[in-house]
Image: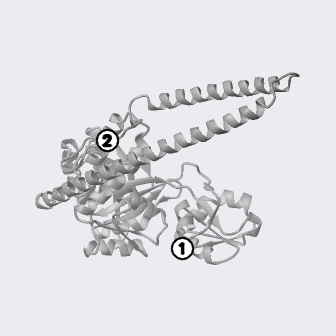
Amino acid sequence: MRASAGTTPLRCSQSLPIRSGYAGKQARRLRKWARRRQLFSRFVRVLRKVARRPGAPGGIWQRFSGAVAEAIRLFREQMQNKIDNDRICIDAIDREILALLNRRCELAGAIGIAKRQAGIAFVQTSCEEQILADLAAESHGPLGADEIAGIWNEIFAANRLMQGKPLVGYLGPRGTYCEDAALREFGSVSLLTPFESTDAAFEAVSTGVIECAVVPVENSTEGVVARTLDLIGEARLPVTGEVVIPIAHCLLTNATELAEIECVLGHPQALSQCRRWLDRNLPGVERRASPSNARAASAAASTPGYAAIAGERAARLYDLGLMKRSIQDEPINTTRFLVIGGQRKPPTGNDATLILAELKNQPGSLSRLLAPLQQRGISTLRIQSRPVRTTLWTYRFFLEFAGHQLDEAVSRALADMGQESSSLFVAGSYPSRQAGVLEVFA
């Protein structure tokens, strides 16, 4: 670890195992100790045989046992001294890390001031992803890419607080998958605020109460969340991010066995996604819909004989036992969330763009709208139609395709598409979190 200004380089009597070949060295050390144990066991067996032979020196086994006990005592004392020395080194490392993290936060605060002056987005996911990739490539010790990402995502989140404390809304209460998505995108130290409904979250963004909100838009087994699309069309707020998380439904309860469960609570979609498992394992048990899985967990925690379908984190939040993990019928069950509001993101090279188009009432209008994308080799990811409530039998098309609106090809395509529609709104471009193929839900 390099020392920064104002910090003292770490001095330890023991070298730290943070270099190339660490895992191999540990394996060789374990094999070495295994061989020593084998040799010692053989020696003990031979000594026992010698001690039992007629004419063997008296008390040989007792003297050997005493010597072994003394050797063990000295070994443990030596190991304790090593542990104490290593702990001193760790304490020194922690102090150096703290000094460096404080310095990093100071620099992040200065960057935040510059971003405000330049009108640049506070959260730049592409920059953070590049940092993680570089760190993973440079790590030659026991920390792998996943461990590095877990540590640095929290550092990124803390630094964001130095840049303006983003207020982020989500569909609550605490313990929902929507909160999981918000935590993944913004970190646990961002200021997260739960809302009772998607409508309330959109209203808070529109009125400036919060900077942005994370809302569900699509599930891989149940389809799109129509209300979210309608609100995007009505509020015309920018879409600035996408979060994709796997959904692992768990059966949470304070009951000790399945036979004690009298009622299963869950969001209607969760109950539907676990239908076959419930039919097999809890046939005849009442299923009751709840506004959210988190509310289901809260109710199950206070009602004997009740169980809830929710995420694993809800078990910790509401002090429930986790009886069964991953009870969803489809193992690849996944939900997409969109970030509504906040600063628009610059191109990353792997982006998606969402637009809303109202078409002229003419034959072939949809194919003409898509033609500029096809001509430029731009992949269409999704098409969804929703009725325009103010005009009878008129529809608004939500179209998501690969690329960023600032890319030259996409920019030219959008200009041509505007000529083929009666109204076109570019909701936003954002880093793509999943590999998409054409899905027509209309």
Above or below, comparing residue 135 to residue 204 in the picture: above
What residue is rendered at 75% in x and 68% in y? 284
Q: Quadrant of residue 31?
A: top right
Residue at position x 79%, y 31% in the image: 59
Instruction: Decide if residue 356 is in sight here.
Output: no
Q: Is residue 275 above or below residue 434?
A: below
- Residue 375 in the image: state x and y as whole percent: 26, 39
User: In this rendering, would 182 be left or right of 83?
Assistant: left
Dot 2 falls on a residue whose secondary structure is: loop
Residue located farthest toward the left when viewing the structure as drawn: 117
Name of the residue lying farthest toward the bottom: 302
What is the total number of numbered labels drawn onto the structure image? Answer: 2
Q: Is residue 58 left or right of residue 314?
A: right
- Residue 178 appears at what percent x and percent y? 44, 63
Quarter of the C terminus within the rendering: bottom left
Q: Residue at x 24, y 60 (%)?
A: 425
How far is mark 1 from mark 2, CA to CA?
A: 52 Å
Answer few, some or many: residues within 10 Å of disc 2's Cα (few below 14, many 20 plus, some between 14 and 19).
few
234 relative to 86, above or below: below
Question: Residue at 42% across / 40% down in the picture?
Answer: 143
Residue, disc 1:
295
Q: Position of residue 120 (x, y in %)?
A: 17, 56
Of the residues shown, which amino acid type is indicated by label 2? Arg
**Foreground residue among 89 and 211:** 89
Colouring: one colour
- The answer to whether residue 73 is seen in the rendering is yes
Circle nearer the N terminus (1, 2)? 2
Which residue occupies the foreground of this view, 29 or 70? 70
For label 2, the residue is: 11
Quarter holding residue 9: top left
- Type of amino acid under label 1: Arg
